[in-house]
Amino acid sequence: MDNKRRAKALKQLKMLKLSSSKMRLAAEQWDKPWKILIATAMSAQSRDEITIKIATALFKEYPSLRKLANAKYIEILFVLKSLNYNKTKATNITKCAKILVNDYGCKVPLNFEDLIMLPGVGRKTANVFLSEMGLDTIGIDTHVAYISNKLGWAKSKSSEKIESSLKHLFPKRYWKKINPILVRFGKTYTSRKKKDKLLGKILAVC
């Protein structure tokens, strides 16, 4: 690894963080691992602020994993009615909760391979969850993919290849910080023109 390239990337990461708001993301500030997982899965193709509001209502209605697992699909769908892809997500939440109760004793596995076997849990959701649990992983979503390619950290549209490039570029202790920093930057500047302008300035400085 070129030390100059790594130092440059770390400086750019710091600038992205300083340029972003401190908004709460959907995976953050829950008191139970299962809530982190469910909220993260719910956030796919949905705005974080809407996901947080709906997830809060869901967890208030079903405060334990067992109660969520015993809930009927139509009941969960009612709570999720304002969420994008609510039917698919309600189905996945129902199935996922039952599996966690019946197969894992109400505990969420901390193993990537086990996580991606759960309904509604893909590579990004699994990695974001694991990073919230303190493990060194990188969740790749549209914000991370776009910014990584713009800054030259990666040169691919493949989530797995982008993840591999970032893991090669950044020291391991930074991995779990990358997704929150880049997602906050992406959500702070929703205008593509404004976003590209700021990324251009970061490239010019670093």
Image (spheres, helix red, strand yellow):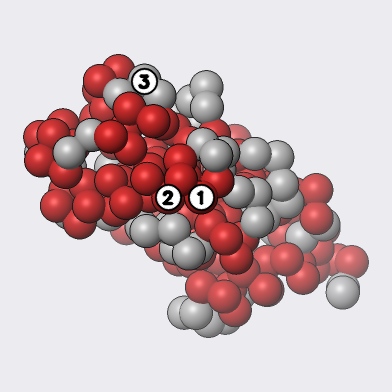
Question: Does residue 119 appear in this view?
Answer: yes
Q: Residues within 10 Å of mark 1 (few under 14, many from 20)?
A: few
Q: Residue at x 65, y 49 (%)?
A: 110
State the residue at coordinates (46%, 79%).
157
Image x and y of residue 158, in percent: 49, 79
Is residue 11 shown to the viewer in this render? no
- Residue count near mark 3 (Cα–Cα under 10 Å), binned few <14, some 14–19, many ≥20: few
Discs 2/3, front: 2
Give how far across and how far down residue 108 sits, in percent: 55, 43
Q: Earlier in the sequence, mark 2 or mark 3?
A: 3
Residue found 32% across the figure and 51% down from its top: 95
- Tell me the amino acid under the disc marked 2: Ile
Which label is found at residue 150? none
- Residue indicated by mark 2: 99
Looking at the rendered image, the quarter that the C terminus falls into is bottom right
Quarter of the N terminus within the rendering: bottom right
Q: Quadrant of residue 67?
A: top left
Marked residue nearer the N-terminal end (3 or 1): 3
Q: Which structural element holds mark 3? A: loop
Residue 160 vs residue 185, the one in the foreground: 160
Report if the CB atoms under discs 2 and 1 are less than 8 Å apart. yes
C-alpha separation, residue under disc 3 versus residue under disc 1:
20 Å
Q: Is residue 11 left or right of residue 102?
A: right
- Identify the residue position indicated by label 1 in the image: 103
Which disc number belongs to residue 63? 3
Q: CA distance from mark 2 to mark 3?
A: 17 Å
